[in-house]
Image (cartoon, coloured by chain):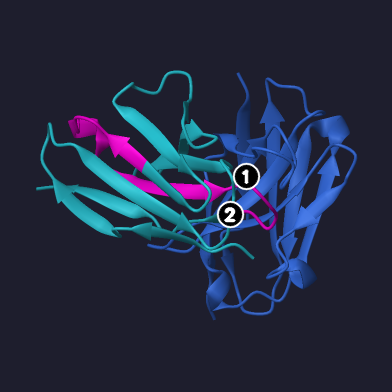
Chain colours: A cyan, B blue
């Protein structure tokens, strides 16, 4: 099974900050990497698919990059509504797997 | 726009069988893959498995021996049964939609149910 490791597990940031979250796969997953945002008590919401493709309706301050084993999610200017937990997910091979999450908190 | 609405028992005793159903509204039931994902309190997400309208399934091996996925395409519903539950199965269970099957290209979950908290306690 493919293990997904996110870092950091949590971070504190201020509105307007640039935030970068990393996700590492235990083996090459090409570009089969997706990012989700989850707010408390809600289901996850898809942000980015195939490592860098922004889903319709997702603000352009979100971007994704990477391929192979190392990926990043970047929020260029953190907004109040972005305080949430972010998860990566590999879709290269079943069983599908998620990273442990990165909680973005207000500094 | 597709909507997923799920229901089922929220409190179980150890060794009982978890049973959840997800109804799909506003979208074609065929041509998609219907998935169950769970999230223990305060923890990350775990993929349980998927089923299509024909009943073809794909499971997470970590749970496979206890999981039964079924579909009622006539009602646009799919279901999850998890047998012999323990406290470790306490989690919020989500149903979700994927446009492609697991491991066949970029599989992601674009629509989700509201989640059901299932608590296993004696």
**Which mark, residue B71?**
none
On the question of residue A40 being in view, the answer is no
Q: Quadrant of residue B118?
A: bottom right
From the image, which quarter does the N terminus of chain A lie in? bottom right
In the image, A95 versus A33, the foreground residue is A33
Residue closest to the far right: B54
From the viewer's perspective, tell me whether residue A100 is left or right of residue B88: left
Q: Is residue A77 magenta?
A: yes
Magenta segment boundaries in residue numbering: A73-96
Position of residue B18 measured from the top left corner of the image (x, y, whole percent): 68, 64
Residue A3 seen in render: yes
Q: What residue is rendered at 68% in x and 58% in y? A: A95
Answer above or below: position of A21 versus B33. Answer: below
Check residue B59 for magenta coloring. Answer: no
Image point 49% across, 37% down: which residue? Answer: A51
Asked which secondary structure carries label 2, the reply is loop
Q: Chain letter of disc 2?
A: A
């Amino acid at each position: 099974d493919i293990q997904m490791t996110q870092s950091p597990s949590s971070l504190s940031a201020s509105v307007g900050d640039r935030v970068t979250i990393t996700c590492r796969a235990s083996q090459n997953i090409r570009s089969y990497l997706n990012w989700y945002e989850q707010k408390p008590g809600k289901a996850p919401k898809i942000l980015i698919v195939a490592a860098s493709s922004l889903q319709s309706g997702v603000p352009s301050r979100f971007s994704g990059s990477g391929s192979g084993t190392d990926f990043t999610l970047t929020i260029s200017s953190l907004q109040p509504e972005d305080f949430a937990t972010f998860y990566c997910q590999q879709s290269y091979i079943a069983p599908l797997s998620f990273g442990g999450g990165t909680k973005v908190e207000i500094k | 726009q597709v909507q997923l609405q799920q229901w089922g028992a929220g409190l179980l005793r150890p060794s009982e069988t978890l049973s959840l159903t997800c109804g799909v509204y506003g979208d074609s039931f065929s041509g998609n893959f219907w998935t169950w994902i769970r999230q223990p309190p305060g923890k990350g997400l775990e993929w349980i498995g998927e089923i299509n309208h024909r009943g073809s399934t794909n499971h997470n091996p970590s749970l496979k021996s206890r999981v039964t996925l079924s579909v009622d395409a006539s009602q646009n519903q799919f279901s999850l049964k998890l047998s012999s539950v323990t406290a470790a199965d306490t989690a919020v269970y989500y149903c979700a939609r994927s446009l492609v099957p697991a491991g066949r290209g970029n599989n992601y979950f674009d629509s989700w149910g509201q989640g059901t908290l299932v608590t296993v306690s004696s």
